[in-house]
Amino acid sequence: IDGQGVGGALVRSTELCEPPSKTRLWGGRPGSPVAKWPQRQALSLRQILYIYGKNRIMDYPIVLKSQFLDRMTDDEFFHFCVEHPNLRIERSADLEITIMSPTGGVTSHIEAEIGFQLLLWNHQSKLGRVSNSNGAFHLPNRAIWAPDAAFVTSEKWNALSEREQMSFPNIVPDFIVEVRSFSDPIKQLRAKMEGWIEVGVSLAWLIDPFREFSEIYRVG
């Protein structure tokens, strides 16, 4: 993986991701510069991000799967995310890295409204800390996920060291919200919501602005 502090090894494209269909490579539209790359082309992680940044035509998130990802430490993953602030990057419990495109207007407006309401409530209650979609959490199952909005009690937050607060905090939020983007497969998003509960989140909301419904997940 050609990343900060991770070395210069290349990974075959067929090891990196699963295209959403046989006619698309990394979610690019047929005939696009992304789709024209040979499937056996050896690409570095940095090259993939360059291609994506140039075209911005990805219909689905990129999922990177490789044995080399096991070698990326938590600190290296954090610095990798810092190097690419325009991308939303998460890591699963299986150490697969998902690279997501920025959200569209509908989703971003809803995220902003939810974040505002949650922040307003917390200013009044003063019970903890609120984070937005840029705030990721290092979960007990090794996943590093960034919900669209989250709340953490002051007790949990104050127990962290200053270094932990500056990185991806090793805590489970008490409440999270995920807003579906147009590119998010609903089945995968529901599985993620169940994953939030499994690691210890007390309450989780899934909001789908395209189907106009919401789902509530809680312990028990």
Image (cartoon, rainbow, N blue to C red):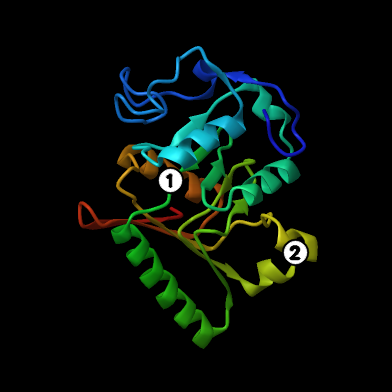
Quadrant in the picture for residue 184: top left
Q: Total marks drawn? A: 2
User: Viewed as shown, does residue 27 lie left or right of 133?
Assistant: left
Q: Residue furthest top?
A: 40
**Disc 2 residue type (three-letter):** Leu
Front one among 21 and 91: 21
Classify mark 1: residues with Cα within 10 Å, few (<14), some (14-19) or many (20+). Answer: many
**Disc 1 residue type (three-letter):** Ser
Query: x%, y% of residue 121?
Result: 46, 81
Query: x%, y% of residue 159?
Result: 75, 67
User: Viewed as shown, does residue 145 lie left or right of 78?
Assistant: left
Q: Is residue 95 visible?
A: no
Instruction: Report the residue marked by disc 2.
Output: 160
- Residue 122 vertical position relative to residue 48 in the rendered view, above or below: below
Q: Residue at x 22, y 53 (%)?
A: 210
Q: Residue at x 51, y 48 (%)?
A: 87
User: Viewed as shown, does residue 179 lie left or right of 52?
Assistant: left
Q: Residue furthest bottom?
A: 124
Front one among 68 and 128: 68
Q: Residue at x 75, y 64 (%)?
A: 160
Instruction: Report the residue marked by disc 1.
Output: 101
Check disc 2 and report its element: helix, strand or loop.
Answer: loop
Quadrant in the picture for residue 148: bottom left
- Residue 190 vertical position relative to residue 65 in the rendered view, above or below: below
